Image: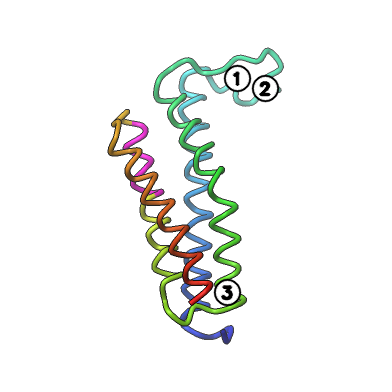
Amino acid sequence: MEPNSADATTVVVLLCFSVVLLLAHIMLQGFLATRELGSTWNAGPRDEGREPKGALAGRAARASKNYQETYPAFVGLLLGLAFIGDASGWGLIGAWIWLIARIVYIPLYLAGVPYIRSLVWLVSLLGLLIMMVGLFL
């Protein structure tokens, strides 16, 4: 794949959006924890081991951890697509599916929506599998 090709540009866009989503997860979790425990807790060393007890802060933390569990696979597959190329286009389709599903996942998790949230998570995994297929086609 040529560095100036449309595929390379799309890979960079996907990578940047995924980093923005990672930062959004971190900031959302931090905001909700700070809202509950206060800015002194946030600015301090947190040696006392206090954790937020509220539902939203807990959900935000778990959603962030869940994102971070599949994020390395996404980045690795995206790098593979950048190096090998994506002649079929399936790899980039899978990447967009993963990213969109991960965006949809956040409000579903924060709202405590069962089943649909799990379905969206499965769709994100399907996106990763489609990315793998794109590497072999």
Mark 1 and mark 3: Cα distance apart in space: 44 Å
Q: Which residues are magenta?
A: 102-110
Which amino acid is tagged 1?
Thr
What residue sits 41% from the left and 72% below the top? Answer: 90
What crowding class fits label 1: few (fewer than 14 Cα within 10 Å), some (14-19), or many (20 or more)?
Answer: few
Helix, strand or loop under label 1: helix
Which of the numbered marks, if any, corresponds to residue 16?
none
What residue sits 48% from the left and 41% below the top? Answer: 25
Q: Quadrant of the N terminus?
A: bottom right
Residue 123 relative to residue 62: left or right = left
Determine whether label 3 and label 2 are within 8 Å by CB. Answer: no
Question: On the image, numbered disc 2 is attached to which residue?
Answer: 44
Question: On the image, numbered disc 3 is attached to which residue?
Answer: 82
Which amino acid is tagged 2?
Gly
Residue 48 place in picture, x, y as percent: 68, 12
Helix, strand or loop under label 3: helix
Helix, strand or loop under label 2: loop
Which of the numbered marks, if any, corresponds to residue 40?
1
Determine whether label 1 and label 2 are within 8 Å by CB. Answer: yes
Residue 47 relative to residue 11: left or right = right
In this rendering, the answer to whether 125 lies above or below 95 is above
